[in-house]
Amino acid sequence: MKKIIIINGPNLNLLGKREPGIYGAQSFKDFFTELKRKHTAYELSYYQSNIEGELIDKIQEVGFSYDGIILNAAAYTHTSVGIGDAIKAIETPVIEVHISNTFAREEFRHQSYISPNAKGVILGFGLQSYELALQSFL
Ligand code: DQA
């Protein structure tokens, strides 16, 4: 069974409460429970941290043994050379996802340190972005 992990960055622990007009009203915990129920062909796991170094540690930990990483680095997408380098360093393919269409938002969200090293990028489909990324590993 393919081992896939979803890694979420800062403030994504507040999904459901945080700016629901942009990020929706569903908590990630509820969404993830549903996703696991629907996609039994994968061994799916989930990790969230608000701390840049912890995200890098997790990427390194899974990056030589898992089949796929679905990464929403949130605000670190636009700032973190370290996360970009971590993705370059590992073997596991990374799909970058965003809930919102970052290109339809502020200019500073148009820059990504993840995209150049990702296998693909999916954004703007709400929480469904994660499911589309998962399907790409089929
Ligand atoms: C986000 C977009 C980022 O610009 C923002 O900082 C986030 C969430 C998204 O999923 O739409 O925290 O990654």
Image: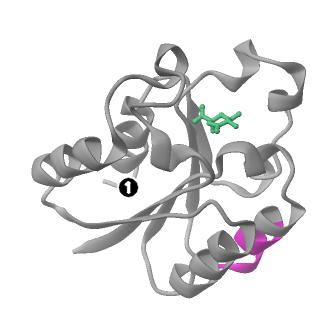
**Judging from the image, what secondary structure is the residue with disc 1 in?**
loop
Which residue is at the front of the view, 119 or 27? 27
| Region rendered in magenta | 85-91
* 29 in relation to 26, above or below: below
The reply to whether the residue tagged 1 has its Cβ within 8 angstroms of ligand 1 is: no
Query: For mark 1, does the 10 Å Cα neighbourhood hold few (<14), some (14 to 19), or many (20 or more) residues?
Result: some
Q: Which residue is mark 1?
A: 137
Which residue is at the front of the view, 110 or 19? 19
Does residue 91 appear anywhere in the picture? no
Please say whether residue 1 is one of the residues in the magenta stretch: no
Which residue is at the front of the view, 56 or 120? 56
> Left of 66 or right of it: where is 63?
right
Question: In the picture, which quadrant includes the N terminus?
Answer: bottom left
* 62 in relation to 98, above or below: below
Instruction: Indicate the position of residue 130 as horizontal and vertical percent values.
Output: 41, 42
Q: Quadrant of residue 58?
A: bottom right
* 114 in relation to 59, above or below: above
